[in-house]
Amino acid sequence: MGAILTLEAAIEARNELRQHGKRLVFTNGHFDLLHVGHLDYLEKARQHGDALYLGLNGDGSTTRLKGSGRPLVPASERARLLAALEPVTAVIIFEADTAQDVLLALKPDVYVKGGDYAHKVLPERPIVEGYGGEVVLIDYLPDHSTSGLIRRIKALPD
């Protein structure tokens, strides 16, 4: 089972990985209403290195970025669920709207995001490429999204 770490503890663990020549993969997101699409994405991300650190948007940033009523599941609970998934080595909760500061602190070897960023600006790309890291875009499992799941739940009869 993975750990839930502060950024400071994650930096220490990252340094240990580096000393042993291990590749760190990092991804981030909200992961509200955990579903099989998330698991598929995290399994694919983990294949790019020896450890997978997941930056989890905290409640404040999730509300700012996803809107009123989100997150549905508090960050502490989302972190616990995600840390229990086999591909996840560690979860770091952060409150900024982007993962730029976490990336600068950890300098992972590989930064993974969803394939939807192939046609969008990825604000973290210059940071990762600036320190020599690799950016990898992974396709999502079709028809598996939190927004789609919320729409289906709302459509259920009372």
Image (tube, helix red, strand yellow):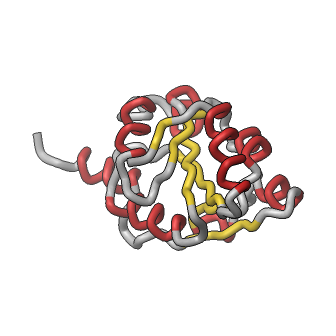
Q: Residue at x 47, y 29 (%)?
A: 68
Q: Is residue 4 left or right of residue 39?
A: right
Q: Residue at x 66, y 69 (%)?
A: 136
Q: Residue furthest right?
A: 130
Q: Say whether residue 84 is visible.
A: yes
Q: For the C terminus, give its image quadrant.
A: top left
Image quadrant where residue 8 sits: top right
Q: Residue furthest top?
A: 60
Q: How many marks?
A: 0
x and y, in percent, of residue 48 in the image: 59, 70
Q: Residue at x 71, y 41 (%)?
A: 102
Q: Residue furthest left?
A: 158
Q: Residue at x 55, y 56 (%)?
A: 52
Q: Is residue 34 above or below residue 110?
A: above
Q: Is residue 6 above or below residue 148?
A: above
Q: Residue furthest front?
A: 20
x and y, in percent, of residue 149 in the image: 31, 53
Which of these two is toward me, 122 or 20?
20
Q: Is residue 98 left or right of residue 42?
A: right
Image quadrant where residue 142 sits: bottom left
Q: Is residue 96 left or right of residue 84?
A: right
Which of these two is toward me, 65 or 114?
114
x and y, in percent, of residue 84 in the image: 35, 47
Q: Say whether residue 111 is visible.
A: no
Q: Is residue 109 above or below residue 8?
A: below
Q: Is residue 44 left or right of residue 128?
A: left
